[in-house]
Structure formats: C-alpha cells, structure tokens
Amino acid sequence: MQKENGKRESPYKGILKFADEKKPQLSFAVVLSVLSSAFGIVPYIAVAILLQKALANSLTTTWAILLPVIALCGYLLKHILYAKSTLCSHKVAYEIIKNIRTSIMKKMSKVSMGTIQSKSSGEFKQLVIDDAERLEGPLAHAIPEMTASILVPIFVILYLLVIDWRMALAALVSAILGNLIYYSMMFGRSEVMKEYMMSNVNMNSTIVEYVNGMEVIKAFNQTASSMGRFQSAVIKVRDITTKWYKHCWPFMSISQAILPSSIAFVLPVGMALISGGAVSLAELIVCILLSMAIVGSLQNFTEFWESFAVISEVQPRIQTLLDMEELPEPAQPKHTDSADVQMKDVHFGYGDSEIIHGISFSAKAGTVTAFVGPSGSGKSTLAKLLARFWDVNAGAVFVGGVDIREMSLTDLTEKISYVSQDNFLFHMSLRDNIRIGKPDATDKEVEWAAAQAGCDEFIARFPKGYDTNAGDAGARLSGGERQRLAIARAILKNAPIVILDEATAFTDPENEDKLQRSIDKLTKGKTLIVIAHRLSTIMYADQILVLEDGQISAQGTHEQLLSRSETYLDMWKAHISAMDWSMNQEVSESC
C-alpha cells in the first residue's frame, strides 16, 4: 500500500493492523519479555558478586547461601516470564493470522468473479494457508523478544561503559561481527524467494488439480503423465530450497560460531587492561560474566533478520490481494420491493473481447423467462451479470427499476437465488449444505425444502440420512442428485428472484417431471430466470429469448418461436430426436 507521501508502509505496521483489540496484550507480552531477559542476567550478577566476595575474603555463610538462591530465583523467573510472554504473543499471533484469513475471504466476496478466476487456486492456498502460517513465528517471537534483545543489552553495555569503554566495545565485537556475517546471507534472498513462491504456487495448483481431476485421470489412464507434472513441480520446489540452504549454511555456521564467543574478545582485552592497572580482577570478572549474559539476546538478532524478511515478503502479498478492486457499492444504496428484472443495452466482455452485444429485455415479477441458444452464446454470462458476479461494461441491469449497481450487494444477494450447473457441496452434512440457503432454518424447514426438491428419497438411502457428510456421500451422489440439493438451497432461501443456470441439466428423466413440478409450484409468484438445454423444461415459460453470438435473435413463447425462429425450431427438432432415441433405447433394453 502506498501512502500519500509516496513511502511504502512498514511491513510490521501493516501486519499489526490485523491485531485489533489484541494490541494491549502484545504490549504486555513485550513487557514480560523484557523482564524475562532482565531476570536472565540475575544469575550472572549473583555469580559475579560471589566471586568478588570470595576473592576479597569477605564471603560469609549468609552470602554463600543467599547468592545461589537469588541466582536460582532469577533463573526461574526468567523462564516463567518467558512462558507467559510467549503465551500472550502466540494468542496475538493466531488472532492476527485469523484476521488476515477472514479479511482475505471477505475481500474475495466483494470482488468480481473475473478477478478471482484470474488467480489460480494454488495462489490463494499459498497466501491464505502457507504464507499466513509463516507469520506465526515472527509475530509470536520476533516482536516481544526483539524489544528485550535490544533494551537489556543496552543497559548492560551502559554499565560496562562505566567500568571501561574498551571492555564494553570488546563485549560487542562478537555480536556485531556475527550479525554482519548473518545479514550478508540475506543478499539475493528476495529474488530466490520470488522464484520459490512461484514454484510453490505452481505445486499447490498442481496438487489441487490432480486431486480434483482424479476421476478423469483414472478414466483416461493419465496417471503417469499427471504424476510427471506433479513430480516436476515438487522437484522444482526442492531444488530451489536446497539451492538456498547451500547458499546459507556457510554464513549460518560461521555466524553461530562467532556470536557466543564474546569471552574470546573480552578476556584478552581485560587481561591487557589488568596488566596496565586500568581495571581490577573483580571488574574483569563482572565484565566477562555480563558479556556472557547478553550473548543469548544478541544471538536472537539473527532470528530477527529472518523474521523481518518473512514479514517483508508476506505482508506486501497480502496487501496486494486486499487492495484488489471491489465491485463498487453506493454510498446511499437504493432499495426496492419489486422483483421485476430488466436489462437495457447491456454490453460485456472478458478482457478486450466483447461477448454480449447490446442485449435488452424485461421480465415482470412472477413470470418465467428462459434463455436458450447454442453453447457459448452468452446465456450463463447474462445470468451472472444479473447476479452481479461481474459489472456490465455498458448499459445497465435493473431489479425493481433500480440499477443493481445502486443497490447494496447484501440487498441484491438477498433478492436472488442462483443455482448453477456446477453444484458445489461443502465438506459438511447434507443438512448443513442445504441450510446454506437459510442459515437460521430449522431441521423441519430444511427437510421440507429437500422434499420439495426431491432430495428426501435419495437422502433416506444413507444410514445417517441428513447428517451424512457431503464429502462421504459425494461419490454416491449422481449429478442430478447434486443439482436437487442445490435447488433445495434455493427453495429454502425463498428469494423473490430465482436464477436456474442449467440447474436441471443432469436430472435423470424419471425425476425431471417431478422436479419441474416442484420448481413450478415453489417459484409461483417469483421471477424465474431459466437457462436450459432441455427445451421441454421451458415449454411453458412466459417468454423465451433465443441467444446467438451474444445477441437476442428471437423472442416469444414456445409456440411463437417454432414459427418465428429457425434456430429454435432446429433446437426443438434436435431435442425431440434425442428424446425419441432415449425412449427407443429404454424399450430395447426392456425387451
């Protein structure tokens, strides 16, 4: 996100926007972390005092007992406070991750379907699952511990400066040198990570595609070639990861060897100062122990480089997605109680290719309007424009005389039930899949809607009935049964406008008439928009629009179109021939 002054927002600041009311808890975690680090120095101070008293021959029994107890208390408090700090920071981290994921899902519900479909499922999976999960460590540890790792060493170094500035600098040499070496490892990381992200997205997309297409893969014996694609994607991720770790390990090994070696610099400097009489032995002991006390904090900086790199990579990707252009909503939305539908000179295209060329029609409330035409003529696109999955490029779509762009998306969604030819069942019970149409519906209402859509008969076959998980039942449900479940959702929703986008396409012949009667009865008084390739299902529509090449070539009732439209007549003849063939097949099989 770009600020008005042209500067890019800090990645940490961008991520912390998702903390909401948890920010005080994060501040509390920081305080606990600082106290934990401070108490971690207590044992070293206690040992230093113990050695000083021993060297001065002033160690009494009381001090000999008290100082180890103080050291033990400091050690215990360090770990108790660290545990409390980590607990608080993890709660904040998981809250932030939850908020990021829900924000992304909310964003997706507000952008056009075209924007969503322009990205692969692997890209969304990478961002929502993998990238969000990568933030857990940096958020839970880097923010509170980084503060402690800065403040506590500062106070120690200030104390060492009081003793001797040369000892203070010697105590910092290993930390500065180790961190410089580790930081050098980060050069070139951004390009490697871009390549890694792209490869990981490709791998995720391939996995999703492979699982979803397993039936086709098996049917056409494509397992070997498909696995080849999957293996190539996995190998690519492996090779990039291995290449990066090969680059990293020398820097990591050297820096981790240097960082804890503060005594290697403090001791010779201290011995030189003692020989010159600049410091005493007792002061040298204090300097050595305190330099060792802050080694852990200074070592943590290497983790902070990694944490900051992760946040710097992930946050812009999240923000880019959240900055996607939404379907605009009016500042003062209009409302209508009417269910009339109208399109005026609608033009629409995907990218630069226009596929809808100036279509206009009206559908009065309570009537049935059917779209028919060859595949690719624009029938489903019109239905999706009415549901505002996309906005028209020119012209307007009206509901109750109000341009749908002047209505709130929530209001429009409540007015329309949309059932497509691609019916998706969520991994939950059949009952809850139907209840999506009306989340607060009772079990009786769900079962009533299922019965009206003809679902009750096949649901009864399952031992758990309506409580059967759709994932378990999916393999045993036919395409027509899935469609009836989707229609049951629309029936339960009871919206004044119903769009059936070839929703009866896979309904078996013996249930087609039953399902059609249910739809006719339950959509009475509603505006019904039907897209169908089975012309028998729309014979009695109030008006039928024949679409060809994104334009309306004919319009009228079934009887009128048989005499007016050659295209419709040909489609009807083909439909009758298909029905005759199907009936002959059934007769042959019965004989």
Image (spheres, rainbow, N blue to C red):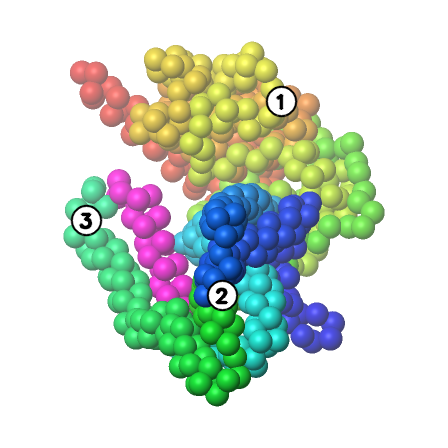
Let me know if residue 147 appears in the view: yes
Left or right, 475 with respect to 46, comes to: left
SS type, badge 1:
loop
Furthest residue toward bottom: 276
| Residue 451, position as x, y percentages in the image | 50, 14
> Within 10 Å of the Cα at label 3, are there few (<14), some (14-19), or many (20+) other Cα atoms?
some
Secondary structure found at label 3? helix
Q: Position of residue 323 (x, y in %)?
A: 62, 60
Marking on residue 205: none
Q: Amino acid at mark 2?
A: Ala
Q: Amino acid at mark 3?
A: Thr
Q: Which mark is residue 440?
A: 1
Q: Earlier in the sequence, mark 3 or mark 1?
A: 3
Of callouts 2 and 1, the N-terminal one: 2
**Residue segment shown in magenta:** 191-216
Q: Nearer the viewer, residue 424 or 439?
A: 439
In the picture, the disc for residue 223 is 3
Q: Is residue 401 left or right of residue 301?
A: right
Q: Which residue is located at x 60 percent, y 64 percent?
A: 151
- State the residue in front, 267 or 352: 267
